[in-house]
């Protein structure tokens, strides 16, 4: 678990209620909404690493209306017990991928606004996600369809420059293959602790798949009368990377899974 960082009391200016698109002094700055929805502004520096920016309110929320192509929603983040807002199917898919990778502990959506210095290639930018990883790394994520990344190169270049000054990493996420996206959407229903197998079943499943075995065969060997009852356990172990499968191929009963002997505790 990531240690709780102490908030620096003097890094930000007194709170206000409205956002801006340029820092008053023409230097790089960051704006965010504190839990009381007041807007705080701070100059870009490593001191921002001490701010609990994963606790922020979204800096903005897009309008949702009938028949809009981009549908908003909430995604349950099991490591914090909170729901994270998303505003498109691509953002949801990227969040599912981050969840499956298992390293991001704290996640916030639309966490802050970056105000770029006078003369920069862009004026301001609202990143899509901010995450604190188990390693302690703080990462700023932008989500953009691959065909549109080139259109945002100037904005992303300025974002990367600011992130480097603070000590954040900056990553741009785009769509993965449709089969992998479908597989993760299928597996995520079994990711929560309620689908974790009992201890004796957990050990038995890891033994069954140690040398590689088809999913359907392994389920039948564990419960010959009702093999379907075993599948949530198997899906849970695949999601938590204790059983290795190729997620770029469609999952079915003939998919071969292999036990990963070493890894993080399941549901950790």
Image: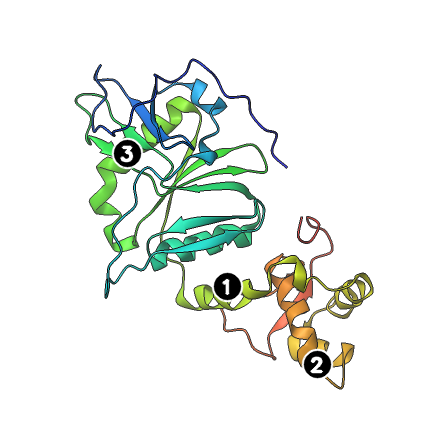
Query: Dot 3: within a 10 Å radius of its alpha carbon, few (fewer than 14), some, or many (20 or more) residues?
Result: some
Work out whether 135 lies above or below 150: above
Label 2 to label 1: alpha-carbon separation: 21 Å
Coordinates of residue 185 in the picture (x, y in percent): 48, 65
* Residue 100 found in image quarter: bottom right
**Element under label 3?**
helix
Closer to the chain start, of discs 1 and 3, is 3
Q: State the residue at coordinates (39%, 18%).
A: 45
**Element under label 1?**
helix
Work out whether 237 lies above or below 123: below
Pointer 1: what residue?
184
Coordinates of residue 258 in the picture (x, y in percent): 68, 65
Pointer 2: what residue?
227
Pointer 3: what residue?
157
Q: Label 3 near label 2: C-beta < 8 Å? A: no
- Give 260 or 6, whichever is nearer the viewer: 6
């Amino acid at each position: 678990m990531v240690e709780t960082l102490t908030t620096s009391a003097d890094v930000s200016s007194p709170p206000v209620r409205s956002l801006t698109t340029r820092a008053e002094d023409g230097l790089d700055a960051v704006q965010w909404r504190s839990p009381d929805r007041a807007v705080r502004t701070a100059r870009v520096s490593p001191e921002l690493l001490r701010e609990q920016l994963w606790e922020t309110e979204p800096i903005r929320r897009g309008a949702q209306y009938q028949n809009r192509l981009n549908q908003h929603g909430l995604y349950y983040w099991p490591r914090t017990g909170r729901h994270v807002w998303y505003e498109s199917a691509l953002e949801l898919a990227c969040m599912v991928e981050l969840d499956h990778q298992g390293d991001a502990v704290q996640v916030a959506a639309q966490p802050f606004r970056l105000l770029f210095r006078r003369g920069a290639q862009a004026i301001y930018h609202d990143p899509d996600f901010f995450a604190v990883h188990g390693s302690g790394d703080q990462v700023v994520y932008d989500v953009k369809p691959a065909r549109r990344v080139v259109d945002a190169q100037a904005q992303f270049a300025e974002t990367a420059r600011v992130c480097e000054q603070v000590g954040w990493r900056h990553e741009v996420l785009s769509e993965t293959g449709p089969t992998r996206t479908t597989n993760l959407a299928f597996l995520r229903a079994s990711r929560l602790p309620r689908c974790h197998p009992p201890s004796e079943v957990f050990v038995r499943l890891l033994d069954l798949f140690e040398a590689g075995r088809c999913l359907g065969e392994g389920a039948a060997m564990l419960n010959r009368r009702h093999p379907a009852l075993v599948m949530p356990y198997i899906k849970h172990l695949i999601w938590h990377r204790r059983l290795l499968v190729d997620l770029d191929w469609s999952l079915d009963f003939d998919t071969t899974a292999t036990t990963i002997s070493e890894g993080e505790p399941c549901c950790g």
